[in-house]
Image (cartoon, rainbow, N blue to C red):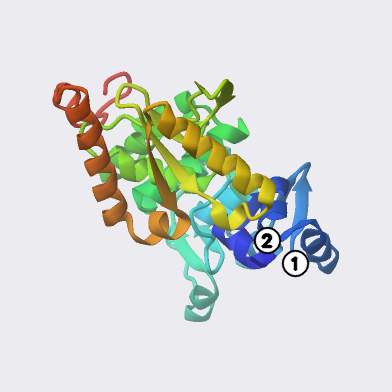
Amino acid sequence: MDIITAMHRHGGVATHGQLKAAAGRPALDQALRAGVVRRVARGRYILPDVVDGARVEAHRLSAVAGLRSAAASYGWSLKTPPDRPELVVPRGRKVGAGDQSTARIRWQRLDPSEVDVWRTSPVRTVTDCATTLPFDEALAVADSALRSRLVTQTDLLRAAEELPGRGRDAALEVAWFAREQPANAFESVVRAVSLDVPGLRLVPQVRLRVGGRRIRPDLVDRELRLVVEGDSHEFHTSERAIDADCWRYDELVLDDWLVIRVSWVQAMFQQAWVASVLHRAATRQDLRLGGDLLRRRGPLRRPTTVGRD
């Protein structure tokens, strides 16, 4: 897989390990020399067009970068990078049709505290994504924001609670379910799908001991003995990586875990099927355990206010 494809599949931002596994170290070094990819921190890389283009357009239109453009500028993992800069302008500002064709414009009133020089602040960015993007995309942004330590879950819950109207419910839901443990947007998207499976309670990056070793699968329901892995075979093509994946899978199965593997394409474009698989897997495991766990758990209750689930 080439570097650009790998970067887009990681939402325009990726780690050294992800890019090395996808395309190899020589290809990464070449992309860095050519300016196709830019290093923004130790082990972290971005597609310059995603961030730089947004900053240039924000300056040209006296706007600020927002939504996924702002999220990418913080190095957060996205489900998909924006196809053009996403900008915020004050309400009432006229923006020409030509400018709207080169950037996605959102008219919004921002307090000075919600602007970080040329982009929306971290909390404002997560909140705006939560009220604008589909739940799975917004959750990927929120998870990544928590991993970055630029926001806390308390920050997100408080900001969501202060929102008026319908946006408040969407922002509160994203803030409530956001976790820092998922490694990337891929895992966040799979977890978002799983949240709608009645009785399923998948927790990211749970430590398990199998075959005499400690491992951390992507998503785990301990009581159901169910593991869900984002199948990154296309990013793990070395013999050593394939051996490790096989060992991990075999040891889990032999330890009586049901392992479900979901590909990137399935997570992004076949979510109804993924939800069906997760539902059938949870039902199967529940029946093996007596058929009562899913009923007792019931559907997840969505939050209606901070401090309640």
The N terminus is located in which quarter? Answer: bottom right
* Residue 97 drawn at (x, y percent): 47, 79
In the structure shown, which secondary structural element does the residue marked by tag 2 occupy?
A: loop
Q: In which quarter of the image is residue 46?
A: bottom right
* Residue 103 drawn at (x, y percent): 53, 69
Nearer the observer, 149 or 59: 149
Callout 1 amino acid: Val
Specify whether 83 is left or right of 171: right
Residue drawn at 56 percent across, 37 percent down: 247
- The numbered disc on residue 219 is none
Give the alpha-carbon distance from disc 2 to disc 1, as whole Å. Answer: 7 Å
Query: Could one spot residue 263 in this view of the protein?
Result: yes
Within 10 Å of the Cα at label 1, are there few (<14), some (14-19), or many (20+) other Cα atoms? some
Nearer the observer, 243 or 91: 243
Residue drawn at 31 percent across, 51 percent down: 274
Q: In which quarter of the image is residue 159?
A: top left
Q: Is residue 122 above or below residue 256?
A: below
Q: Do the residues labelled 2 and 1 touch (CB within 8 Å)?
A: yes
The C terminus is located in which quarter? Answer: top left
- The numbered disc on residue 47 is 2
- The numbered disc on residue 36 is 1
Callout 2 amino acid: Leu
